[in-house]
Image: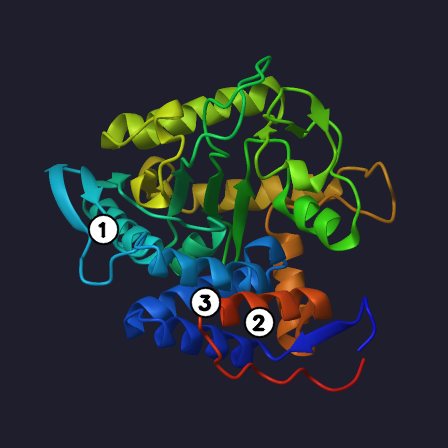
Amino acid sequence: MSRGKTLRFDAPALGDYATRVLSAVGYPPEDARLCAQGLLEASLRGIDSHGVAILLPHYVRLLRNHRVQVDTEPVIDLEQGAIFRVKGRHALGARTIRFAIEHAIARCSQFGIGAAAVAECGYLGALAVHLVPFSAHDRILLLTSNSEACVAPFGGIEPLHGTNPIAALVPAGKDRALVMDMRTNALRMADYWQALDSDGELPEGAVLQASGSPTVRPADADGGVYLPAGAKGYVLALLVDVLTAGLSGGPIGQDLRGVGPEQYSAFVLALDPTVLNPDGGFDSAIERLGRQARSVKPADPSRPVRLPGERAERERSRRVERGIPVARERFDTMLASLRAEGVDTKPPSPLEGP
């Protein structure tokens, strides 16, 4: 096929393929299912930088490089009322964070709030995909994670902290939720992969070379230094380090330079909004806020103001119906990466038609 060709894959078939690959390399059935589920959800929501085609080989390498242990379980090792600490003990990140969220929601049902500091949480990928499965619980959920130090503080040229993303889920009426997921550094991974695939350039002001000089070359990003999303991004990144490593006792800031994802930390909060605003008051307030946001006059009439998560939900519906688009070169690169790891699981066939 010609360069630039986009393939489309049936979502269940792509999810089944990811599950079979992960099972083939040694992940237990539940771990393989959870991991594949998260990758597929990212692909469905249009978060392709954290979806199947890009991250599936990464999870294979995590296991092969002993960054994930399949014979261990996350545990609660400290607790007091509504708050507790989880030790992931190097289990799969998706399993550890699922464990923490489930227990935070259970404590929330008892106390109105539940909060967990998570040590040794592992790599989590896109944070929002871990919250979406819990949208039916009608709880405000917050999830943050630190990561390997690769981002400079505002005004600096050396790494201090990780990309330190923040995600939240807010119930917004029947079968609806505001889903927020943001990085605290300037570079979107989607922009990185797009530049890499198209031989293009990174956005200005996102990455420095290791020497401290600005760069727009994608090849410089791997060994370079990321820049924060301004002073506010820097402040939020520090807050993430406080809530994650500061509370869990894990490595913090520059302690994470050269440290694998099994040493990352996370923070989970579950809050019952009806405790503080009962009798439908919270639901009514969020509904009014949504109406107000949508009624704001847009700068571009063709692009009305949206609420967080709406674009992803629309993209999800479209991809469920039409298939998940993957650039042919990206799909071939994924297969080559898997073959280099000794994985030759038969991939799904692309859908026919445009």
Could you say which quadrant of the image residue 68 lies in?
A: bottom left
How crowded is the residue under tag 1: few (<14 C-alpha within 10 Å), some, or many (20+)? many
Colour scheme: rainbow
Q: Measure the alpha-carbon separation of dots 3 and 1.
A: 36 Å
Q: Amino acid at mark 2?
A: Leu
Residue for point 66% across, 62% down: 314
Residue for point 29% across, 71% down: 30
Horizontal side of residue 201 vs 253, given as left or right: right
Of residues 282 and 176, which is closer to you in this image?
176
Q: Amino acid at mark 1?
A: His
Q: Quadrant of the N terminus?
A: bottom right
- Can you identify the residue that label 1 sits on? 103
- Can you identify the residue that label 3 sits on? 341
Residue sticking out furthest to the right: 301
Q: Position of residue 250 (x, y in %)?
A: 26, 32
Q: Measure the alpha-carbon separation of dots 3 and 2.
A: 10 Å
Compared to residue 224, the image places residue 199 above or below, namely below
